[in-house]
Amino acid sequence: MHGDLRNQKLAVVREALYDSAIELFASNGFDETTVEAVAEAAGVSRRTFFRYFDSKDDLLAHAIVSYTRTLVDAVEAAPPGASPFEVVTEIVLATARYTDALGARTQQVMKIAERSASARQAYLSRMMNVEDSLANALAIRFGHTSMHELRPRLVAGVTLLVMNSTITSWFRGEHANIMSAAGGALNELQTIFCDRRPKKTLKSPIGLTATPKPAKSAALPNLKRSR
């Protein structure tokens, strides 16, 4: 019980630092905001700040921890027997719901990253860890022995690309909400890669030929789009 209370206290301070930082980054700029200013706004000392975060970069990327957990949980929750495309669909929709629940906070973070190259870099530097975690979950799901095998790594990369496109499309105002943007991105992905055009003989880089099997098209959930 004592350990639970301590963990709750740690979580409260961590979230207070993160919330204070996002507000300051949004109003004053990421590069212009100091660690001292964040600590003061959260009501803690500079020394306390460094008990929770290594730097401003580490602080800004704090939300990626929950984002990663959402991705991995969605892989595990996908229906048994789901195809890779259906698993991607489940992950994207679950992550879109998570992002939507954050409300205006997502827009704030996007604006911070848009205005600051160092803020963008702070996020990008953590994305390889996100991809590794997702690929590992997919490797387990698909029965592979390593996350470095082609299928889990490829599906992880495609999933993150679709999620990126979804959030960017919504942020740019192309869709009224995240769920609509997710549906649009998934429909476009299906159109590009899962169509049923006549077979074509493909020439591989090493000079061999291969006739691809027709892609199995997966039905997407009925999503209401708002524009």
Image (cartoon, rainbow, N blue to C red):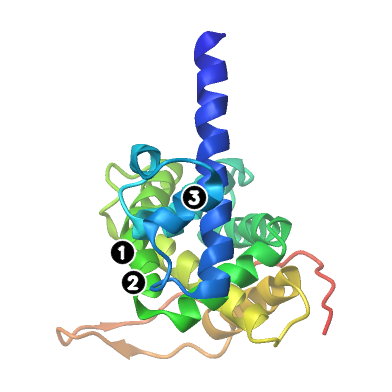
What SS does tag 1 mark? helix
Amino acid at circle 3: Glu
Amino acid at circle 2: Gln
| Residue 40: mark in rendering | 3
Compared to residue 207, the image places residue 165 above or below, namely above
Closer mark to the observer between disc 2 and disc 3: 3
Separation of marks 1 and 2 at Cα, in angstroms: 6 Å
Residue at the image point whose x is 57% and y is 45% from the top? 16
What SS does tag 3 mark? helix
- Judge whether residue 85 can be spotted in this image: no
Separation of marks 1 and 3 at Cα, in angstroms: 27 Å
Task: Look at mark 2 in the image and give the residue it sits on.
Answer: 121
For label 2, count other residues whose C-alpha is less than 10 Å away and answer few (under 14), some (14-19) or many (20+): some
Separation of marks 2 and 3 at Cα, in angstroms: 25 Å
For label 3, count other residues whose C-alpha is less than 10 Å away and answer few (under 14), some (14-19) or many (20+): some
**Horizontal side, residue 42 vs residue 35: left or right:** right
Relative to the observer, which residue lies in front, 138 or 62?
Answer: 62
Compared to residue 191, the image places residue 129 above or below, namely above
Amino acid at circle 1: Ser
Q: Are dots 1 and 3 in contact, CB under 8 Å?
A: no
Q: Quadrant of the rendered structure where residue 174 is?
A: bottom right
Relative to the observer, which residue lies in front, 213 or 75?
Answer: 75
Residue at the image point whose x is 35% and y is 60% from the top? 57
Task: Look at mark 1 in the image and give the residue it sits on.
Answer: 125
Relative to the observer, which residue lies in front, 198 or 90?
Answer: 90
Residue 85 placement (x, y as % from top left): 55, 64
Q: Quadrant of the rendered structure where residue 131 is?
A: bottom left
Residue at the image point whose x is 57% and y is 18% from the top? 5
Compared to residue 42, the image places residue 9 above or below, namely above
